[in-house]
Image (cartoon, rainbow, N blue to C red):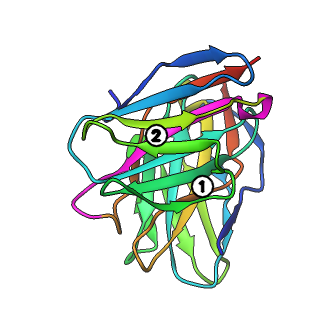
């Protein structure tokens, strides 16, 4: 079985500052990794995904994440945040074999960008 | 604009009543999913649906829940007799791309269910 831990429930940050949202996962098999964002009163939007290949993946809105197999981590980063990045961010995994039927989500990290 | 449309956006119902939540994918895909998010908690998998059959379901998806795709387009989640603890945001999702593996899920904006 897989599980996801997002170490920070809330991350306050000032506008134009860098940010890192942490995600660790546990799995006995290889996994695919995802970050989703949820803006207020909206659904879940895919930010980026790691399937294979380069461990540094770039997504929308200037976000990137790095897959670290030895540390079982997939931290999300942005070098300079905007007010509009204020949202809930979810890390998710799915097994990398056998097709996938479900995403396992972390508890989420609320990013609050202040002026 | 989401690739999956969910209706209604908000549903208020009394305990013990039946509710039907609807999901309409824009394009014709075969893999569908329901997730729920109780306020302040993580997003949880409920059920996956492939080719008009349930392919996997979680422990949450008990006999009170059912899914179907009655007209080949709308994908519905029915809760037969709602309980207070069913209050949550319910998300429909479909698999993107040409296959299930490697393709991320595309979520709708959700239906907020409030059971009173």
Q: In this rendering, is residue B21 above or below A57?
A: above
- The residue that appears at 60% across and 26% down in the rendered structure is B18
SS of the residue at dot 1? strand
Q: Residues within 10 Å of mark 1 (few under 14, many from 20)?
A: many
Residue B10, by quadrant, is top right
Q: Quadrant of the N terminus of chain A?
A: bottom right
Q: Are marks 2 and 1 on the same chain?
A: no
Can you see residue B87? yes
Can you see residue A18? no
Task: Work out how far the residue at label 2 is from the one at label 1, CA to CA, in angstroms.
Answer: 18 Å
Task: Give the residues drawn in magenta, as a range.
Answer: B84-99
Q: Which residue is mark 2?
A: B92
Q: Residues within 10 Å of mark 2 (few under 14, many from 20)?
A: many
Q: Which residue is mark 1?
A: A91
Q: Position of residue B20 (x, y in %)?
A: 51, 28
SS of the residue at dot 2? strand
Q: Is residue B49 toward the left or the right of residue A94 in the image? A: left
Q: In this rendering, is residue B1 above or below A66?
A: above
């Amino acid at each position: 079985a897989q599980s996801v831990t997002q170490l920070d429930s809330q991350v306050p940050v000032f506008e134009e500052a860098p940010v890192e949202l942490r995600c660790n996962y546990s799995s006995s098999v290889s996994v695919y990794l995802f970050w989703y964002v949820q803006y207020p009163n909206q659904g879940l939007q895919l930010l980026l995904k790691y399937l294979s290949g380069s461990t540094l993946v770039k997504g929308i809105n200037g976000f990137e994440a790095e897959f670290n197999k030895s540390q079982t981590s997939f931290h999300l980063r942005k070098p300079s945040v905007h007010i509009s990045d204020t949202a809930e961010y979810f890390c998710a995994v799915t097994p990398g074999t056998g097709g996938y039927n479900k995403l396992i989500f972390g508890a989420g990290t609320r990013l609050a960008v202040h002026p | 604009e989401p690739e999956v449309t969910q209706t209604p956006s908000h549903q208020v119902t009394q305990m013990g009543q039946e509710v039907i939540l609807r999901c309409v994918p824009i394009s014709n895909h075969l893999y569908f999913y329901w997730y729920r998010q109780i306020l302040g908690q993580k997003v949880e998998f409920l059920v996956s649906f492939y080719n008009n059959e349930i392919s996997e379901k979680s422990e949450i998806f008990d006999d009170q829940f059912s899914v179907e795709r009655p007209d080949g387009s709308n994908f519905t989640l029915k809760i037969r007799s709602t309980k207070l603890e069913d209050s949550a945001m319910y998300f429909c999702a479909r698999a993107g791309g040409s296959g299930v593996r490697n393709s991320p899920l595309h979520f709708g904006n959700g239906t907020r269910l409030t059971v009173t």
